Image (tube, grey):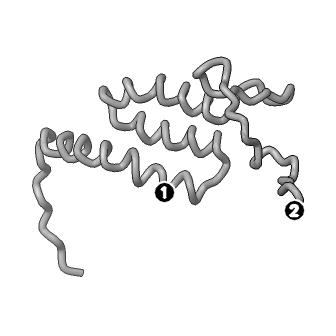
């Protein structure tokens, strides 16, 4: 009987290869784009999320900048609804409740 030979493919490797470090592998950057999409998104978040606690309008700016970076409008809108809108709505409601309410005008017949 012959010996079963497995093809020499990476996913059939019987050896356990150990990585030299525990840090994730870094992708090589292209010369045309010095920062990855993830790095740009983290930078926008680091700059604007602290400001969003002061003024909720920065959450909208944050969403717009993420949209420009990712260049995928439908996905950006869904992410904005999922991540930023829940933070934005309570702040807007609190701000609206603090403002004095205007006097309602009576409707004039036409």
Q: Position of residue 55 (x, y in %)?
A: 33, 31
**Which is more toward the observer, 6 or 24?**
6
Helix, strand or loop under label 1: helix
Q: Position of residue 100 (x, y in %)?
A: 11, 42
Which class describes the residues within 10 Å of circle 1: few (<14), some (14-19), or many (20+)? few
Q: Position of residue 42 (x, y in %)?
A: 54, 29
Q: Eyeballing the image, is 17 above or below 97?
A: above
Q: Residue 87 falls in which quadrant of the image?
A: top left
Which residue carries the number 2 mark? 1
- Camera-near label (1 vs 2) is 2
**Which is more toward the observer, 102 or 66?**
66
Q: Residue 58 falls in which quadrant of the image?
A: top left
- Please name the residue shown 24% across and 40% down the image: 91
- Please name the residue shown 55% across and 25% down the image: 43
Q: How far apart are marks 1 and 2 (CA)?
A: 60 Å
**Which is more toward the observer, 83 or 65?**
83
Q: Is residue 94 left or right of residue 63?
A: left
Q: Eyeballing the image, is 29 above or below 56?
A: above
Q: In this view, does 17 lie to the left or right of 54?
A: right
Which residue carries the number 1 mark? 78
Which class describes the residues within 10 Å of circle 2: few (<14), some (14-19), or many (20+)? few
Q: Is residue 85 left or right of residue 73?
A: left
Instruction: Kindly indicate whether the residue at mark 2 contacts the one at mark 1 (C-beta within 8 angstroms).
Output: no
Residue furthest toward the top?
21
- Please name the residue shown 23% across and 45% down the image: 90
Q: Eyeballing the image, is 39 above or below 94?
A: above
Q: Earlier in the sequence, mark 1 or mark 2?
A: 2
**Which is more toward the observer, 36 or 26?**
26
């Amino acid at each position: 009987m012959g010996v079963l030979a497995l093809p020499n493919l990476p996913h059939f490797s019987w050896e356990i290869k150990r990585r030299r470090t525990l840090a994730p592998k870094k992708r090589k950057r292209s010369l045309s784009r010095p920062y990855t999409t993830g790095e740009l998104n983290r930078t926008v978040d680091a700059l604007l999320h602290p400001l969003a606690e002061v003024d909720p309008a920065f959450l909208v700016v944050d969403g717009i900048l993420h949209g420009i970076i990712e260049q995928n409008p439908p996905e950006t809108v869904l992410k904005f609804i999922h991540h930023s809108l829940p933070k934005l709505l309570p702040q807007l409601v609190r701000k609206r409740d603090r403002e004095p309410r205007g006097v309602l005008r009576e409707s004039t017949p036409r």
